[in-house]
Amino acid sequence: MPPAHNISTRDQRPFSKRDRTQILLTSISLGVIALLVLLVSIPLVQNGAQHRGMQNLVEASTHKTAVITTMRNALWQKTAGLQHMLLADTAAERNTYYRQFNEDSASYLAAASHLASLGTLGDEAAVHTQLQQQARFSEPYYESTAKLIMDAAPASLVTAAMRDIAANKEPVLASLDRLADIQRSRAMRVLDASRQQNTFVRRLLPGIALVMLTLTGAGVRYVFLHLSEKNRQLAYHCSYDPLTGLINRREFESRLDRLIQQTREKPAIHALLYMDLDQFKLVNDSCSHAAGDELLGQVTRLLLGAIRQRDTLGRLGGDEFGLLLENCPLGKAVELAARIQRTFDGFQYTRGEKTFSLGASIGVVLIDDSTSGIASVLSAADAACYIAKESGRNRVQLAHLGDHRIQQHQVEMQWVSRLKQALADDRFTLFYQPVVPCAGGSSRERHIEILLRMIDEDGTLIRPGTFLPAAEKYNMAAHLDRWIISRVMEWQAQHSNAAHPPPTITVNLTEQTLRSPEMLKFIIDRAESTGIAPQHVIFEITESKAIASLPSTTNFMLTLRGYGFRFSLDKFGSGLSTFTYLKKLPIDFLKIDGTFVRDILADPVDYAMVRSFNELGQLLGKETIAEFVESLNIADELRKIGINYAQGHAYAAPAPLGNFVHAVAPRLVVVSS
């Protein structure tokens, strides 16, 4: 028998050449496959890491947006709480609302603290710093107003305080909106970066996938599906409102812009409806923000049921909706707006034991080949909606180009934007005009009035009569006063020395400043920090504004007079009131309205009025100032009447404050006729 462990000669042969070739080819193939797997893995791993980073950024932006929304809602809730406290019928009810007010205040502060803890990136920092400054500026108003209401303070003080809150709330809301816009923009940039990365991977993989199709096809397909799903999620969050499921403002404006471009290429007629819910804030404030969110969902379904299938409905923010009507003439658009309002007529929202009825103020604007752009369309629609609210709410207002109300609103909003930018860029400057002794006025010191000028972007100087009405209407006048007072006191401190006494300066104040406890504190603090002598500062107040809010004006003046400041009553005589208020207001000077002074040589009535005003002022122990003194003959006549001081081009035109130099106290030289 052969041996049990005998091995054949074939089994003992070395590998043949063919076998070695197969092994080599197999090894090379495996190496190529391994290299291909490595080449595929590197971009996939990088793409996955970058995508996770992008996802974290989106989640962080979403988190910040939620915190910003909480702050905004809490701010509205606090304001509503003060209204409820003010309207409460009993002390117990007022106490209940006061506790709710404190809870809302705590909620706002907690959200603000949480937002600060999340940190800032890039352009958020400046906006967040501004928001913190605005919050520190506005928070004391809420506490002081609540205290006034709980202490049953006079209605005039409470009303003034509520106005101050309304004025200071808007900048905070604007900063919150800017932060929210930054988050949306950041999410959109992340989406674009993700798309670019995905495009890169798509271009790289096909060539490699052909070689290793059988090995990596399923994995590659999974990667693509995974990335596509993530991109769809990112696109949805950037283009849609998560609460209502409607497109958001950014996507709405994008579609509106495309429609305007298409209309220029192929003329057609479209319409835009800008809708603002009436009484929505009542639900939000009296129930809860959750109730407000629920109501927005119901309103969305209501609107979707009232419009055409091809129309584009979007939520523009808060309780504002936009409706884009393609191929829709103006008459049809108005008919659809009326149908929407009729839909609201039968709608009621119930929360617990409370039932609410809603309406909608709607602005309608036409879009055709003459439409200039998206900004003009939205501005006109917003202005029309604003006018509909001002006219009684639950109305439809057409945006006619010739409607002076819409034009006025648009012009005012443009001025508000320009003023905000000018303040941010520090594009204001100060002029001065001398106030000279006339008859019995003191000549021992220089006396000048400070005048404000705005520097336009092209360098043009703009007088305050152009922009001040918009500033006063939209609560920006106090910001201008703050800028002026700060610069003037710094300038006066620099021009005070042993060789020359500081000039006496007159500074004009607006009505908003007279009603602002914060501005009162600012003036006192600024005077103390600069070290100026208050007796060399005269604050000038327009007669009509002083009378309009007499209690707060009197309190404001008495407080500052206690520190040594003096006061002048401007435009005296223009209101032709009973003048009984003169006994109450602690004023030092009466500045006679220039419309009377200008024509005293030609108009006997104006002459008699100026003389009477002067006699009244002298009888009350006030010194008199005549403005608009345009000629030496007028100045001579004023001296005869007994006016103490004169101001006008007969002596000097306004000049830049930087040109002021100390000199011997000037006297107006006149020639008697």
Image (tube, helix red, strand yellow):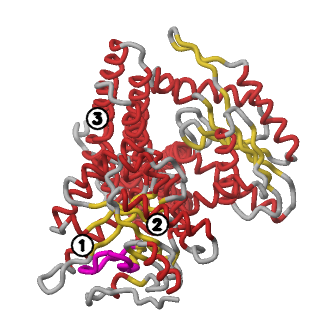
Tell me the element at label 3: helix
| Residue marked by disc 1 | 490
The three-letter code of the residue at mark 2 reads Gln
The three-letter code of the residue at mark 3 reads Glu
Q: Give the range drawn in magenta.
A: 432-450
Numbered label attached to residue 143 = 3
Calculate the distance from the C-alpha at mark 3 to the C-alpha at mark 1.
31 Å
Q: Dot 1: few (<14), some (14–19), or many (≥20) neighbours within 10 Å?
A: some
Mark 2 or mark 1, earlier in chain: 2
Mark 3 or mark 1, earlier in chain: 3
Q: Residue furthest top?
A: 353
Calculate the distance from the C-alpha at mark 2 to the C-alpha at mark 1.
23 Å
- The answer to whether residue 230 is left or right of residue 122 is right
| Residue at the image position 62 percent from the left and 31 percent from the top | 278
Q: Does the magenta stretch include residue 205?
A: no
Residue 9 visible in rendering:
no
Mark 2 or 3, closer to the camera: 3
| Residue marked by disc 2 | 421
Q: Looking at the image, is 129 positioned above or below residue 7?
A: below
The three-letter code of the residue at mark 1 reads Glu
Mark 3 or 1, closer to the camera: 1
Percent of width and height locating residue 549: 43, 44
